[in-house]
Amino acid sequence: MTIDINGIPSMPIIIANKNKKILDYNFFSEMFFQNLKKVRYMDQLDFQDKKLMQIPLKDFDAYIFCDDNLSDGFFKTIIDNSYDEIFVADGNGIAIYCNDMFENNYGVNRGELIGKHVNYVVENNYVDILLFDDVVKSKKTITYKQKTITGRTILNTSSPILDNEGNVSYVVENCRDITENELLYNALNHTKERLKKEEEFVNNDDSKNSFNIFKSKVMNEIILRANRFAGKDVNILITGASGTGKTSLAKYLHNVSPRSKKPFVNINCTTIPENLMESELFGYTKGAFTGALTTGKKGLVEQAEGGTLFLDEIGEIPINLQGKLLELVQEKEYLEIGGTKKKTADIRIITATNRSLEELVKNGQFREDLYYRLNVVQMNMPSLDGREQDIEVLTHHFIRFFNKKYNVSVSISDSVIPYIKNYSWPGNIRELEHLMEYLVLNAQNYSIEIGDLPKNIISATEDLENFKLNIEFEKGLSYKDLMDQAESDIVNLYHKKYNSSYKLAEALKISQSTANRLIKKHCRD
């Protein structure tokens, strides 16, 4: 940036960076400041009662010797090129000057404003707040933040200039664009708050549904993905078989999100009768229907205001209610039963299902537009079968939890762990949880031993350990017949533990189509 200073040859001018390190100066500065060549920073100068005016520019600051003989044109050139916004109004609030940066920050042309009252910028929504009247009334400098129509955040310092009688002659606003600083500050605070929430939640080992205990690769990937989307207000659909922990994942997403201090409202759509579903979700007004409470009732949507609404088993929502749910998901608006004015909802929606919503859409049982609105991000909770690392840590976790709940001190024998790992857990985490609760309550001598386990869990391991091919050496049996017998024994044994074609294929290292064919051939339901 170049500033024309012709016509004022005797003026000392020093240029310094924003840290006040001296970058350059003219010849006359050496005459005014005898130690100028020996110092590096402005505050090291020997001023000797000399007054310098600091002019903030974009990349540096100019320090100019104050002289009553300076021309008005010089000051206007300096101020017009200032990186900060300069605005001046008289004591009556009439705008008399603003520089280029003012126009950039407020999005208003100076020709539109000069000569008008300063309230013009508020009345026309160029800025959200103006404290001119407060400055005039208090006769003191006030610093405050403003939001402008251009989306900028401005730090406004408004200072009164008083005449000899103590009346306000002018108010000078010096404003700096702090938008980037504000964004960085907010982002930093948000990150700190989120990390704090994650640490508090993850370290809360008393939580039965804690997510800090998983060891398997698949669950670590789910946790990383959950952390990635927790802070973003997008709809999430959680899929997975019953008992895999879909509700726990929904709670985790809520607890590490910016909404964590607001309600988490959980509704299982299978537990509410179809004829009551609408009133439970959206509430109703006074006298909306026969039997309604005289005071009306808040629905679960309103109870979740500011927080998270978790709709479990979303596939069970009646088709005739899905249109109203779509409006909530899409527009964040809803109408109470008996109401005439729509309400707005500030909520985050998470849904879960153990059914194939795609199939329900194909069969006309679920609206396609609602499905796509809910399925912005999909997360699948895997079955517990085969996740040996997670099975072991969950076993110890639930034992600790139920020890604390029932005020006991039960341990589990190391010899029991292989039996726990070898079982297929068709009921997933829920089945493991309930078994551990039973074992803690039923343990003899405060120790869980093999004999305490249910027979089906013991037999799953013993079948594998004691497996022998049951081949009948009958006369006339061909090699193919014998191989079919062996194949049947192997498939039946493994199918008891790996009870789907996908799991069986993975265990026997064969294709899923081959596994499906073998199940149909050898296994009877």
Image: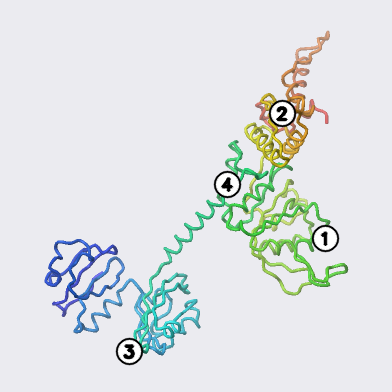
Query: Could you tell me which secondary element the residue under label 1 belongs to?
Result: helix
First in sequence, mark 2 or 4: give its number: 4
Asked whether, in this view, residue 65 is left or right of residue 348, the answer is left
Q: Which residue is mark 4?
A: 225
Q: Which residue is mark 1?
A: 276
Cα separation, mark 4 vs mark 1, equals: 35 Å
First in sequence, mark 1 or 3: give its number: 3
> Which amino acid is tagged 1?
Leu
Cα separation, mark 4 vs mark 3, equals: 64 Å
First in sequence, mark 4 or 3: give its number: 3
Q: At 46% from the left edge and 84% from the top edge, which residue is drawn?
A: 120
Query: Could you tell me which secondary element the residue under label 4 belongs to?
Result: helix
In the rendered image, the residue lying farthest to the bottom is 165
> Which amino acid is tagged 2?
Ser
Identify the image quadrant of residue 283: bottom right
**Few, some or many C-alpha atoms within 10 Å of disc 3 (few <14, some 14-19, many ≥20)?**
few
First in sequence, mark 1 or 2: give its number: 1
In percent of width and height, residue 478 lies at: 78, 12
Q: Which residue is mark 2?
A: 447
Identify the image quadrant of residue 209: top right
> Which amino acid is tagged 4?
Arg
